[in-house]
Amino acid sequence: MTSGTLITVAPTGAEHAKSDVPNLPVTLEELVAEAVACEAAGAAMIHVHIRGADTKPTLDLRRLKDTVAALRERTNLVVQLSTGGAVTDLEDHRLRVLEAMPDSASCTMGTVNFGDDVFMNRWEFVVELHKRMQERRIVPEYEIFDIGQLASLRRLLDRHGLPAGGHVHVDLVMGVPGGMPGDPETLVAALRAIPSGATFSATGIGRTSLPVMLASLSAGGHLRVGMEDTVSYARGERVRDNAQLVSRAAELASVAQRPPLSADEARTLIGVAQSN
Ligand code: KMH
Ligand code: ZN
C-alpha cells in the first residue's frame, strides 16, 4: 500500500452548465484560482477540461496550451488534460489535445453509455491515444468506467507496451449512469482486474462520491474529487468550491494514515518527470 494519497482535483468537467452551477470554474482566471486553492488544500494533480468564452466545453488548442502554461506558472500541480472532452467531441480533436504537451492525459479504455448519451472510445482510437502519448512522453491515466475496460487495458499493454514513465495508473470513474456502480463491492471487484503493479485512484459521481472515497482509501487507493464529478457536498448542500472537496479528501486521507502526497511525490508515483 502506498504510504500517501494522491489527490486529483477535477474542477470543471464537460457536463455541468455554468448557468446551473454558477461557481463552476470556466474562465482561465477562475480555473487557476481554484487550482492554487486546491493545491494548498492537498491536491497534487489537476484533471482539466476547459471552456470557451461562451462557457461551453472546448478543445481549442491555443486555449489548452495557455491553460497548461498558466497552471505551470502558478502551481506545481501535475497537469493532466482530458482527452475525453465532451461526448460530442470528434476523435481528431481529442487526439490533438496531446499537442498542448501536458504532463499527463486521460485515456478512456472503452465505450460506455453515459446518461442519455454514449461516450465513444473505439479500440483503434484508444490504441492511437496510447501510442501518441508514448511518443510524446505524456503519462496516461487510464479512465475506467466499467470493469470490462480493465480487460481492454491489459490487452492494450500486452500488445502495445507500457506507457511513458513505465508505470500504469488507473482511475476508476464509478457511478456514471450506464457504467459500473459506485459502491465498495464493485470497487473490490474492479481491483481484481487491475494490471499487476498498477496504482489506482477512484471517484464516485454524484451521491456515490463519499462511499467510493472511503472504499478507495480503505483499499489502498488514491482519490479524485471535484465539481466535474459532484456538485453536492452533502445532502441538500451544494459544493462551495473545489477546495472544499479537496480539503475533505485530504482530511479523510490523513485519518486513514495516508496523508496527501505533494505534487513532486505524485510525479514519482506515476512516472512524470520532475519539474525544474
Ligand atoms: N466528459 C466525459 C464524456 C475524461 O476526461 O477523460 C469524459 C470524461 C473522461 O470526462
Ligand atoms: Zn474528465
Image (spheres, helix red, strand yellow):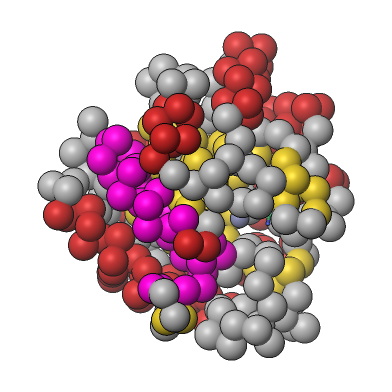
Q: Where is residue 191 in the image (x, y as percent from the top left)?
A: 42, 27
Picture quadrant of ligand 2: bottom right
Q: Which residue is drawn at 59% across and 88% down?
A: 22
Q: Is residue 1 above or below residue 214?
A: above
Q: Which of 77 and 185 is in front in this view?
A: 185
Q: Where is residue 88 in the image (x, y as percent from the top left)?
A: 84, 57
Q: In this view, does 140 lie above or below 123?
A: below
- Quadrant containing the N terminus in the rendered view: top left
Q: Residue at x 75, y 38 (%)?
A: 111
Q: Which of 131 and 209 is in front in this view?
A: 209
- Residue segment shown in magenta: 208-234
Q: Which residue is drawn at 63% across and 26% down?
A: 148
Q: Residue at x 66, y 33 (%)?
A: 109
Q: In this view, does 77 lie above or below 194?
A: below
Q: Where is residue 206 in the image (x, y as percent from the top left)?
A: 52, 62
Residue 16 within the segment the image draws in magenta: no
Side (left or right) of 4 relative to 204 = left
**Tag count in the figure?**
0
Residue 273 occupies which quadrant of the picture?
top left
Q: Which of 261 and 68 is in front in this view?
A: 261
Residue 13 occupies which quadrant of the picture?
bottom right
Q: Where is residue 61 in the image (x, y as percent from the top left)?
A: 75, 61
Q: Is residue 188 above or below residue 267?
A: above
Side (left or right) of 129 relative to 77 = right
Query: In this view of the protein, can residue 103 be seen by the observer?
Result: no
Side (left or right) of 255 relative to 248 = left
Residue 156 occupies which quadrant of the picture?
top right
Query: In this view of the protein, can residue 17 be seen by the observer?
Result: yes
Q: Nearer the viewer, residue 174 or 161?
A: 174
